[in-house]
Image (cartoon, rainbow, N blue to C red):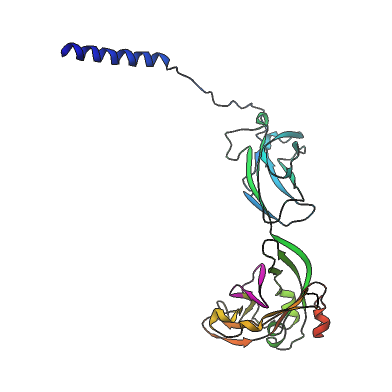
Amino acid sequence: MKLNKIVTISAITLLFMASCSNWKDSEIPSPEVSANSPAARFASTNPASFEIPPSNDMSFTLTVIRDSEAKANALDVPITIISDSAFTVPSTVSFAAGSATATLQIKIDPTATPGSTLPLAISLDNADANPYKAEYSSYYGKILISPWVSMGTAQFYDDFIFAEWADEPVPYVAEVSIDKNFLDPNSFRISYPYTDDILKAVGDDDGSMGGTTQANIVFTINGDNVTWSKFWYTSLLYDGDGTDIKAYLPSAINKDGDSKSVVVRDADGNIEYFELYPYYYIDGLGGFGLFPVYLGFPGFDLSGELGVPIFQ
């Protein structure tokens, strides 16, 4: 039994020694950076994602930087495409003499589908880079082709804010941009109509201005009716901070009236305008009730129909 144990131990020792003979120390040297390297890299301010409106001339830009000590001379840094979906990437990015920054413009295939997300990965030539910098010599990003497609200019009239609310109303119709959602043909958005200029022009300059604003208002057609997401802001205050006047979807505050907001079409089924009835309400204080709002689609003369001039 002792002999067997000794043999067993010896066999294990030989196996270990044989395995060790196959192990080799290896060293991977750290990258060496030339003392004259411009240390070109992508600025940390570059977004990781972009949302680009669909058009025939889509593009975006990235900022590339280099060390200020290396900015005396002009420099072209080669670019390598790691992966791309639908982009035209220049072969180099060019620094002007005396400049520590350069702009790289990347074009997007105009046939890219609205709503699609396109990945992009590019890198700068290693000879001009410095891997020890905080910023990176490679860029990885995602570009969303916005699902919102421009329809042109629409006309917007709010009978409460542009007329009833003002002390001395001089009503106007506001011109707004209107987009249609490529992924949801029943969804539309307009640019925010309650600008300071038009609110001043209709008489809302008594201290009520300065409420919350928003980038867009989104409307959705549901059968013959039109809805929106709970409320939109009007940029007006009832009585100081925290008393924003909002245009609520009536059902969002348990009021009747959703069915009054409708889409009006011509004989061929094309949308002429939305007739909307939001309930104007101040959270915690109460409301003013339903008032009509009209959104005239491109090609429909809402101003002429209402007899209200367009704000210039």
x then y, percent, for residue 120: 66, 43
In the rendered view, does 58 fall on the left or right side of 138? right
Q: Is residue 292 above or below residue 40?
A: below
Q: Quadrant of the N terminus?
A: top left
- Quarter of the image with the C terminus is bottom right
Question: Is there any visible trace of residue 145 in the rendered image?
Answer: yes
Front in this rendered view, residue 19 or 127: 19
In front: 214, or 122? 122
In magenta segment, residue 216: yes
Indicate whether residue 145 is drawn in magenta.
Answer: no
Left or right of 149? Residue 286 is left
Establish if 82 lies above or below 62. above
**Vertical order, 152 against 65 (above or below):** below
Q: Residue at 67% of width from left, 56% of height from top? A: 115
Count numbered badges in the picture.
0
* Viewer-nearest residue: 129 or 276: 276
**Residue 167 in the image, given as x and y percentages of width and height:** 70, 88
| Residue 233, picture quadrant | bottom right
The magenta-colored residue range is 209-231
**At 75% across and 48% down in the image, what residue appears?**
109
**Residue at the front extreme?**
268
Please give the name of the residue rendered at 69% of the width and 84% of the height, measured from the top-left corner: 292
Q: Quadrant of residue 119?
A: top right
**Percent coordinates x, y for residue 250 in the rendering:** 59, 82
Visible residue check, residue 210: no
Q: Position of residue 132 (x, y in %)?
A: 57, 34
Is 108 located above or below residue 257 in the figure? above
Q: Which residue is at 56% across, 85% downward?
A: 255
